[in-house]
């Protein structure tokens, strides 16, 4: 099996673009990623498109209408918050299968029109469900409280996640927000579902991201090795679907299983990872995932955030991009936007937020009750 | 790369099931295909699900909720009328890539609820679009008329396609209809868009179909060789998306390109194929695809239907299942239902409609302006 590399990757600045169509948003990121690779759509042999809101709408084909209808296979994927990661993974698989040497993966979402029926939602309105019992905010609130009662994790520790991620985003011009949110502001913002305040919920935005994937052979032939990022592991698992108002879903197991499989596939452990983009749909979720991904032992997540180990400059920086809490969370785009962030660091192009000497990075997305996707990426070809 | 085999395949009887959910319909076919393989969901390492109407609704995960939530990767695919073929192909690819040895592919559609907003449409109401200029019925009517003016193809010849396919379906208890439609009835039924009458339009039904795919190694290990069907070619192409009321789409090129690629991949030619399940969304479409798939030379399609070459017992039987015109066309299920039909013949299990000595079969689906999928299947392991 050929190794597979990311040879081009980019994303648009996340924001609110009600005047744009989903294919237009997707096409922008596609062209940017192709440009980053120094290639064109004529070089691509397949397109994998991830979009949730218009999943039945042939978004991939309509992106090609914008950038070049070359007749290549198009596969439209939908997998909740793992939609973009799923499209990326199917593209990776198509090269592994020896079918193609150059494949384009695009993730795109227009949250306003596509999923929430129009209008531009305000900062902090949770993108993952409405309020109330059994909904995403209450599920992640409950899971946080469970962690508190088991390990003594405090409201302040949860809030510090948001402070950190917003701070990280101040140097990411592709994030929705580049604003500091002091601890006091985070703790005093509107309570959505205790212990998550409004500033501790992911930001509902439109966005797109794209990656060009290449076989080892093509990386060599085209001399793309100096910027290539190797896909060391690609794992997708499913999470038991359940009617949400009946039982409180388990927010941990799916990620733990996927992480175990990803470390095995890459032949590395958590200590080898230099930075992580994980699914901080709520501040409490990020705390749980430190442990779920093995970045620390069970019960140690509070200490991790207190001691700055997960901040830029710390032992294992998490969500240096600003994460879903500040960069924003356009569902179908998020998985590939994560790849963009990690790739920039591995290529040494992350500017002010560069994780120095980064060689291995991890991306993580999870759609609760649907799917979890984890990728491990490595510097160089 | 491992060869990939269909080791279990089945479909529900197509019909109108407004009281069922899409996941329930999908689960039925999934269990039937697993049973056909002598395997269970616990043996499966991934699930590829094709559904168009609820493409954003995690249908694959909800099927697992019905039959066993084992945590395996689930990918939900949507690709217009090629949705089922796309899900099948991604499953095939995942085995080719060496990731899995046993994969389940499910295609399902509930046309009433899922796509047309409720109610059970009557026989012959075109499932592929509404009436009027630039819609599917008018596009395929125009394409038929163009064939007539070029080659002298007659209204009667188009109508004979429907007579043939309805006749074929009389021995297929999984078809929506098992009724003869004499030529006079077909020609005198309500005119939808000349030259296609109501009985020359595909039938709008609910349905599901599923296939279990296995690697060569697993076929041997499990001793499944006696019923295995080898996937000799799997091709997907995209068709230029266009706003339908602006330009009359080209209904031929996408299929021609895909057929060329499929014959190349399989290393066979049209003369080697023993039977074909092709996309007879309208009677005129079937006539065009005889030529597009190379079953005869350009301009010879009328003769093919006149001389019975494409009927059961003829040189190259087409749509022995009854096709979309009589078996029915539940969009996401159709691609895998085609695999079921071909596999039954290759296994010698097609009963009264058996194509004797069948060794190679072809399936073809096309969503105009979206995607074309062609597979070539071979008897035995």
Image (tube, coloured by chain):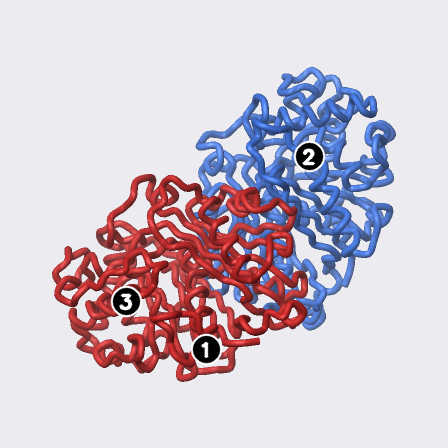
Chain colours: A blue, B red
Q: Which residue is mark 2?
A: A251
Q: Is residue A295 left or right of residue B80?
A: right
| 10 Å crowding of disc 2: few (<14), some (14-19), many (20+) | many
Q: Which residue is mark 3?
A: B165
Q: Quadrant of residue B373?
A: bottom left
Residue B165 image position (x, y, % from top left)? 28, 67
| 10 Å crowding of disc 3: few (<14), some (14-19), many (20+) | many
**Residue located at (82% from left, 53% from top):** A359
Circles 2 and 3, Cβ within 8 Å, touching? The answer is no
Between discs 1 and 3, the one toward the N terminus:
3
The chain under label 3 reads: B
| 10 Å crowding of disc 1: few (<14), some (14-19), many (20+) | many
Residue A264 image position (x, y, % from top left)? 79, 54
Q: Nearer the viewer, residue B337 or A157?
A: B337
Q: From mark 2 to mark 3, how far is it between C-alphas?
A: 51 Å
Q: Which residue is mark 1?
A: B360
């Amino acid at each position: 099996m050929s190794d597979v590399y990311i040879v081009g990757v980019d994303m648009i600045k996340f924001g609110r673009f009600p005047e744009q169509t989903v294919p237009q948003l997707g096409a922008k990121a596609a062209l940017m990623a192709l440009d980053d690779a120094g290639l064109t759509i004529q070089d691509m042999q397949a397109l994998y498109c991830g979009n949730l809101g218009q999943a039945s709408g042939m978004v991939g084909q309509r992106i090609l209408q914008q950038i070049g209808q070359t007749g290549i296979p198009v596969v439209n994927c939908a997998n909740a918050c793992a939609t973009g990661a799923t499209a990326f993974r199917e593209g990776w698989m198509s090269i592994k299968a020896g079918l193609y040497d150059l494949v384009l993966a695009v993730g795109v979402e227009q949250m306003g029109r596509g999923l929430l029926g129009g209008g531009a939602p305000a900062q902090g309105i949770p993108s993952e469900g409405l309020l109330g019992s059994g909904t995403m905010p209450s599920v992640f609130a409950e899971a946080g409280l469970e962690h508190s009662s088991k390990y003594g994790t405090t409201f302040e520790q949860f809030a510090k996640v948001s402070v950190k991620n917003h701070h990280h985003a101040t140097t990411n011009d592709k994030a929705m927000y580049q604003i500091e949110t002091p601890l006091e502001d985070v703790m005093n913002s509107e309570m959505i579902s205790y212990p998550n305040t409004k500033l501790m919920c992911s930001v509902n935005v439109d966005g797109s991201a794209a990656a060009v994937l290449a076989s080892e052979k093509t990386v060599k032939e085209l001399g793309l090795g100096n910027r290539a990022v190797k896909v060391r592991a690609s794992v997708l698992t499913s999470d038991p679907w359940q009617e949400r108002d009946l039982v409180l879903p388990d927010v941990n197991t799916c990620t733990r299983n996927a992480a175990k499989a990803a470390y095995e596939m890459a032949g590395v452990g958590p200590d080898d990872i230099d930075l992580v983009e994980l699914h901080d749909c709520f501040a409490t979720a990020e705390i749980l995932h430190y442990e779920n991904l093995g970045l620390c032992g069970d019960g140690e997540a509070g200490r991790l955030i207190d001691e700055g180990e997960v901040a830029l400059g710390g032992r294992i920086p998490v969500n240096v991009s600003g994460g879903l809490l500040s960069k924003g969370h356009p569902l179908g785009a998020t998985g590939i936007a994560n790849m963009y962030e990690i790739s920039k660091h591995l290529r040494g192009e992350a500017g002010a937020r560069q994780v120095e000497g980064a060689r291995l990075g991890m991306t993580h997305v999870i759609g609760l009750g649907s799917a979890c996707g984890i990728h491990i990426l490595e510097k160089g070809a």
